[in-house]
Amino acid sequence: MRNPLLPFPVKIDDIVVETEDRNLKTFKLTFLNPEDEKLFQHRAGQFAELSLAGKGEIPIGIASSPTEKGYLLFTVNKVGLVTTALHRLQAGDIIGVRGPLGNSYPWEQLEGSNVVVIGGGFAFTTLRASIVYMLHPDNRQRFGDITVIYGARTPGMLLYKSELAEWQQRDDISMHITVDATDDPEWKYNVGFVPTITKEKAPSATNSYAIVCGPPIMIKFTLPVLAELGFTQEHIITSLEMRMKCGIGMCGRCNIGTEYVCKDGPVFSLAQLARLPAEY
């Protein structure tokens, strides 16, 4: 059995600066050993630990879909020691990746249902993986209507802009992009906070699930909107990514009541969270 604390060595194959403040970069990683890639079989919604020698490791949601073979994508916000060091690296540098960790979105449960994906800001990473996964030709027929509501502070803070534009052109997904505010005369999408756009654009709750991931304040005000629209707690799925720590439940810093976010989550239904202490 492989030691779960040992990272796989990976090479930075490419780096994309995502946002106008340059604090969000997407790293494309390839495994040095092809056998390691076979061992790293993830599902959309899971996370991994990225590690830099002498700096430490940090849990990051996996932004690539399992249908994207040969590489992994991680979008990293420069906020601390490890992420700042990671932002200084270049293509060709070697780092470690440990995982995949945690659970995923409940894809078998969602089959046959409509899915509305609601995200905000930096937390759109695992939602990107989920959208790419559902749109893959092998999977698209497994799901009903797919609706995406995604917001950021400004147009320049949106992630994955080229893919958002591609999805806008498809007829098998409904896209609703929004920003909090903008003075850009070329902006042709929505202006308003995610909860407001959700109330206007979300599909009927009948035979639908909502996947919600974003800043806590966005989630706080989006959940009542979904309840008002008729989504039950069992049909609202969210991810407590901000609580992820060591990934295997050893450090004991991720627990909420009896649940360890790193092992039992980070994905929970609102019904599951309602049974836990309000510590998140």
Image: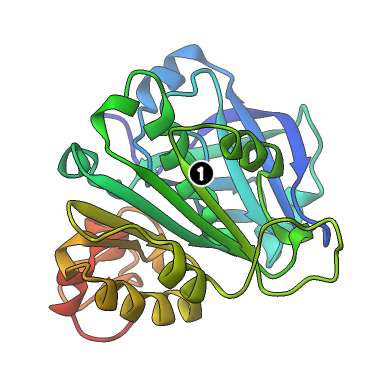
Q: Quadrant of residue 93?
A: top right
Considering only vertical position in the picture, is 65 above or below 157? Answer: above
Q: Secondary structure at mark 1?
A: helix
Considering only vertical position in the picture, is 277 above or below 157? Answer: below
Location of the C terminus by quadrant is: bottom left
Q: Nearer the viewer, residue 179 or 37?
A: 179
Considering only vertical position in the picture, is 250 above or below 148? Answer: below
Q: Nearer the viewer, residue 252 or 226?
A: 226
Three-letter code, disc 1: Arg
- Residue at 39% from the left image edge and 44% from the top image edge: 5
- Residue 41 location (% of width, % of height): 35, 27
Q: Quadrant of residue 227?
A: bottom left
- Residue 59 location (% of width, % of height): 49, 55
- Residue at 42% from the left image edge and 82% from the top image edge: 221
- Residue 258 location (% of width, % of height): 15, 73
Identify the residue position indicated by label 1 in the image.
Answer: 128
Residue 32 appears left or right of 225: right
Residue 254 appears left or right of 174: left
